[in-house]
Amino acid sequence: GLSSVSSSSPSLGDLPESCVASIIGYLDPPEICKLGKLNRAFRGASWADFVWESKLPSNYQVLLDKILTFVPENLGKREIYSLLCTTNTLDGGTKKVWLDKSSGGLCMSISSKGLHITGIDDRRYWNHIPTDESRLADQNQEFLGHIVPNRSTQTWWFEVDGEVEFPFPAGSYSVFFRLQLGRSSKRFGRRICNSEHIHGWDKKPVRFQLWTSDGQHARSQCTLNEPGKWFHYHIGDFNVENSNSSTKIKLSMTQIDCTHTKGGLCLDSVVIYPSKYREKLKQKGFL
């Protein structure tokens, strides 16, 4: 039957560009970009401003002013979306912010160097260890009790505090500490984990807390007992209603007990994701 169809029969290329734009506006950004390769009409529609404005956070102009030091003039909405999806650094590289390419949800990662860690200046307890397993690849993770392999490198007092103020788009967000018991390395191309210095974390749970400037508070606790894997330990959730003002967040992680010492913990970062992404984090290690 197809061989009998006239070459003048209507095709996708004959659809008006405005109609195509109205249709693809219901799709996710990656699908829109793929369809833009189909033909001229789809390519033009995939750059339509009204299509991409619906994908951008409502406060995208505030985000541009906060994240980028220079914004070229006359940018289209698709170009703005692309800029915000790029991993942008803040505060001397200790924080990174980006939009999830598929949904436009805002994500943030705070390096261990952007956190206040008790005893961080004492090399008997903490050391910066470069690693390609870090969430912030150009940053370092921290390792507790690793420099000198003896009992003098152990500690009773473990406390980490962090603070961030940012104009988060309206929505619900989840906050996590990214941690690992033991130090990872590679030998003959295989990943191995040194658990020699891990001790004390199974005696008492670690406590997590967060506070927001508008009075929200969340707390949780968890016993660290699975060495060799990176886990996202859930601190709590917070909600943002006003996208045009900054939300200030304070967070903490503590394990203080003078009855036993602790050692062998890697602290990589704190991550903030839209709450709907919890399932994705479960695949990467989530507690």
Image (spheres, helix red, strand yellow):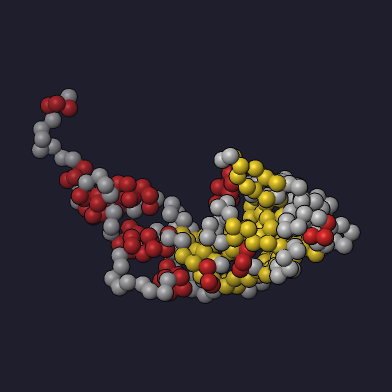
**Relative depth, front residue between 256 and 5:** 256
On screen, residue 222 versus residue 168, left or right, reads right
Tell me if I can see residue 211 in this picture: no
Q: Percent x, y for residue 128?
A: 64, 61
| Residue 141 horizontal side relative to residue 58, left or right | right
Location of the N terminus by quadrant is top left
Q: Where does the image place residue 23, in percent across and percent down from the top left?
A: 30, 50
Residue, far top: 1
Image location of residue 87, percent across then percent down = 46, 61
Q: Nearer the viewer, residue 45 or 69?
A: 69
Residue at figure coordinates x 69%, y 58% from the top left = 143
Residue 126 lies in quadrant: bottom right
Q: Quadrant of residue 51?
A: bottom left
* Image location of residue 185, percent across then percent down: 62, 47
In this view, which residue lies farthest toward the right?
Answer: 259
Residue at 22% x, 46% y is 39
At a point 61% along the width and 68% down the height, the residue shown is 114
Does residue 243 appear to the left or right of 220 in the view shown? Answer: left
The image shows a total of numbered marks equal to 0
Query: Is residue 104 positioned above or below 11 on the image?
Result: below
